[in-house]
Image: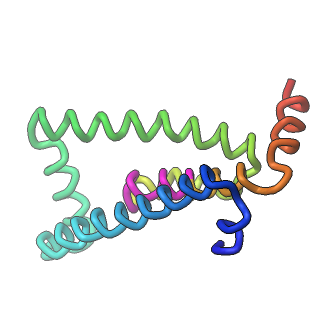
Amino acid sequence: MARRLDEMGARDRALCVFYGLYTVVGFVAMGWMAVDFIVGHSDGGTSGVIGDFLRDATTNLATKFVYADLTLVWIALAGFMISEARRHRIRFVWAYIIGAPLLALAVSFPLFMLVRQLKLAAPGAGVETQRVRVAAE
């Protein structure tokens, strides 16, 4: 990937670095919180951890609001990711969508955006995008 970064323009490179760093920070932050939660609720096994999480996520109106908001954003972003994956021929888009509830939206979405930006910055990407649009019309 380092070679690809050297070959792209400054704007594309900056976006790739941003998305890459955001993915790493999201993974570390959300991973730390997930491990902390799992360790604190491990006495009930896997089903106990999941049950405790769902109960805690819907305990009061504030947690329901945050949980519902994230779920609705995740659904909207799934539509965007599917559309962009088709447009730019990004493989395994379902892995990014499923990755949101499994890892975190703060990990899977910036990772998708990084892959998308690499596709956009690839040599000849503009020509390929035009061909896909013309074929779709």
**Position of 91 compared to 58: left or right?**
right
Give the magenta part as a residue range: 103-113
Residue furthest to the top in view is 137
| Residue 69 against residue 11 in the figure, above or below | above
Q: How many marks?
A: 0
Give the residue displayed 87% in from the left and 42% down from the top: 127
Give the residue displayed 68% in from the left and 68% down from the top: 6
Residue furthest to the left in view is 60
**Position of 130 compared to 4: left or right?**
right
Give the residue displayed 41% in from the left and 67% down from the top: 24
Residue furthest to the front in view is 10
Front position in the image: 66 or 38: 66
Front position in the image: 4 or 84: 4
Q: Residue 36 falls in which quadrant of the image?
A: bottom left
Horizontal and vertical percent position of residue 84: 66, 41
**Position of 22 compared to 49: left or right?**
right
- Residue 93, can we see it? no
